[in-house]
Image: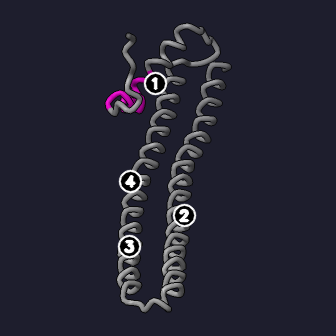
């Protein structure tokens, strides 16, 4: 029976975020293809910066995801406390008042969920924008570097 790789093997996954791993692949590719009009050392240096920017952007996302998860836990805890409070109130209510208390409970839960989802969505968007900003800045720098490399070789 063939051995299956664990898709969630953390040490194996972390190797994918190592810039040196990508640089080895880039070096192998450049050795295969001769590009006389490009300074390969400068190109490799630029690519290393690109990989580092990608890793930094990913780290930003991971850090923000951790913060969002922590905030979600806090929000769930708050909602559960509110539900417990309303349930205690509901247990003390008279039979004729139960439908109104049920509707109150449902409205309170919905309101909490709605506010919480908006907050989490804003946090996710901010994390994605921060990460994308890093990549965008590096992309623009990379274009300038590549243009400079090409101009040097052409001269």
Q: Is residue 143 magenta?
A: no
x then y, percent, for residue 96: 50, 91
Magenta stretch: give its range.
Answer: 11-23
Q: Residue at x 38, y 10 (%)?
A: 1
- Cβ atoms under marks 4 and 3 closer than 8 Å: no
N-terminal label among 2 and 3:
3
Q: Which corner quadrant of the image does residue 6 belong to?
A: top left
Q: Using a 10 Å C-alpha cutoff, classify the residue at mark 3 as few (fewer than 14 neighbours), some (14 to 19) or many (20 or more).
A: few
Nearest to N terminus: mark 1 or mark 2: 1
Q: For mark 4, does the 10 Å Cα neighbourhood hold few (<14), some (14 to 19), or many (20 or more) residues?
A: few
Instruction: Return the residue at label 4.
Output: 66
Do callouts 1 and 4 mark residues in contact (Cβ within 8 Å)?
Answer: no
Q: Earlier in the sequence, mark 1 or mark 3?
A: 1
> The residue tagged with tag 1: helix, strand or loop?
helix
The answer to whether residue 19 is magenta is yes
Q: Secondary structure at mark 3?
A: helix
Q: Quarter of the image holding residue 64?
A: bottom left
Which residue has dot 3 on it?
78
How far apart are the two marked residues, 1 and 3, measured between alpha carbons?
44 Å
- Horizontal side, residue 15 vs residue 120: left or right: left
Residue 122 - label:
2
- Please give the label number shown on residue 22: 1
User: Residue 79 appears at what percent x and percent y?
Assistant: 41, 72
Q: Main secondary structure of the magenta part?
A: helix
């Amino acid at each position: 029976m063939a051995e299956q790789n664990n898709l969630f093997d953390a040490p194996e996954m972390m190797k994918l975020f190592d810039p040196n791993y990508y640089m080895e692949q880039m070096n192998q590719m450049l050795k295969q293809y001769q590009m006389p009009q490009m300074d390969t050392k400068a190109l490799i240096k630029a690519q290393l910066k690109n990989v580092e920017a990608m890793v930094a952007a990913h780290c930003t996302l991971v850090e923000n995801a951790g913060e969002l998860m922590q905030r979600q836990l806090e929000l769930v805890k708050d909602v559960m406390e509110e539900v417990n409070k309303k349930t205690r109130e509901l247990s003390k209510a008279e039979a004729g008042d139960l439908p109104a208390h049920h509707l109150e409970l449902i409205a309170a839960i919905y309101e909490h969920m709605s506010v919480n989802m908006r907050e989490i969505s804003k946090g996710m968007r901010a994390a994605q924008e921060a990460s994308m900003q890093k990549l965008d800045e590096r992309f623009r720098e990379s274009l300038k570097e590549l243009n400079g490399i090409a101009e040097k070789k052409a001269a």
